[in-house]
Amino acid sequence: MALHDSGPPVIRRATDRMGAAVGATVVLALATACTSTPTSAGDESQPSPAGLAAYYGQKPNFGSCEGYGSTPGEKKLYAKPFECARLTVPLDYRDPKGKTIQVAVLRLPAQGDPGQRIGSLVLNPGGPGGSGMTQATTFSTAFAKSPLLQRFDLVGFDPRGVGSSTPAISCFTDQERDRGEDQTTLLASSGKWSEDDTRRLAERCAQGSGGKEILAAVGTRNAARDMDILRSALGDEKLTYAGQSYGTRLGAVYAEMFPKNVRALVLDGVVDPTLENPPRRLTQQTGFQQNFEKLAAA
């Protein structure tokens, strides 16, 4: 998966499924772990930043998922027993009394004895731009017989700018996608890609998404701040989280910013945050090639 540390997802990507190989690790780590992370200069967990009390105090009104999902397939997935709600967060955390946006959340309540419930398990599939709501539905199928679903509420959210969250980043119309213009534009990035090309794409995305201020506000740290408000809104003192690919970066940034609020993190397919774009892409393609060769041999 591509890593963009602070830039916007310029196209919605299909959600990955949590692989079975990580299943045993997830069950063990989430059911027993209690994480302790040293406090850093970036710790913003205690106390809550001034002006954010109303956001931290909100209680999502979970109910029908009708109206959620950006594609017919997603809308079909988001049915009972799943519940959906919207979380209100500030567009700009430096101005909490300014404009607000909404983060879409999907929940599957714990299936076991209420007295054995541990809390919420929050998911992120990577991307950036993957739908955590869709991932929660596929995860629930893959781990239907797991103790995880007995003891945790399964929670997926579409990060700001993604999927059912509003506003959502939109760089191409449906008609342009049907004509393949989105792929033509994005594939060009693997060849010659000029500053003017970048500017034109950014302007196109801003026009379709509500303006440049929206694009400027969808970075990783704001997503991590949203996740801490989500943790509080779910009633969890500490966050239990499973992230894949870019979701490992989001989880690591959350732990850096809110170390006292972490219960357990499971990070699958960890992205090296020290790599710049060219070596990161080479590392990624090497991994793809290795896996292809194993598949071909099998």
Image: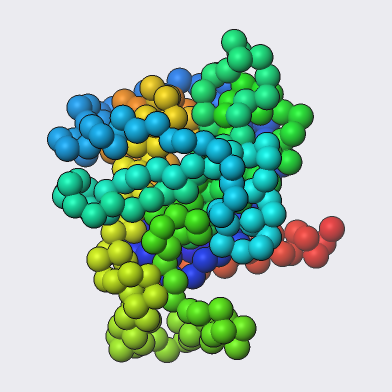
Q: How many labels does the image show?
A: 0
The quadrant in which residue 3 appears is bottom left
In this view, the residue in front, 176 or 261, is: 176
In the displayed orientation, state which residue is furthest to the top.
115
In this view, the residue in front, 225 or 63, is: 63
Residue 152 percent location from the top left of the image: 58, 26
Residue at coordinates 38% horizontally, 22% vertically from top-left? 237
Describe residue 47's horizontal placement relative to residue 227 as left or right: left
Note whether 159 is above or below 25 in the view shown.
below
Residue 168 percent location from the top left of the image: 43, 63
Residue 213 percent location from the top left of the image: 25, 66
Residue at coordinates 62% horizontally, 83% vertically from top-left? 178
Residue 259 in sight: no
Residue 55 in sight: yes
The quadrant in which residue 198 appears is bottom left
In this view, the residue in front, 144 or 53, is: 53
Note whether 123 is above or below 294 in the view shown.
above
Residue at coordinates 50% horizontally, 80% vertically from top-left? 173
Describe residue 70's horizontal placement relative to residue 253 as left or right: right
Q: Which colour scheme is used?
A: rainbow
Note whether 59 is above or below 141 in the view shown.
above
In this view, the residue in front, 138 or 108, is: 108
Residue 125 percent location from the top left of the image: 55, 50
Q: In which quarter of the image is the C terminus?
A: bottom right
In the displayed orientation, state which residue is furthest to the right.
298
Describe residue 37's horizontal placement relative to residue 25 as left or right: left
Residue at coordinates 48% horizontally, 79% vertically from top-left? 172
Note whether 247 is above or below 37 in the view shown.
below
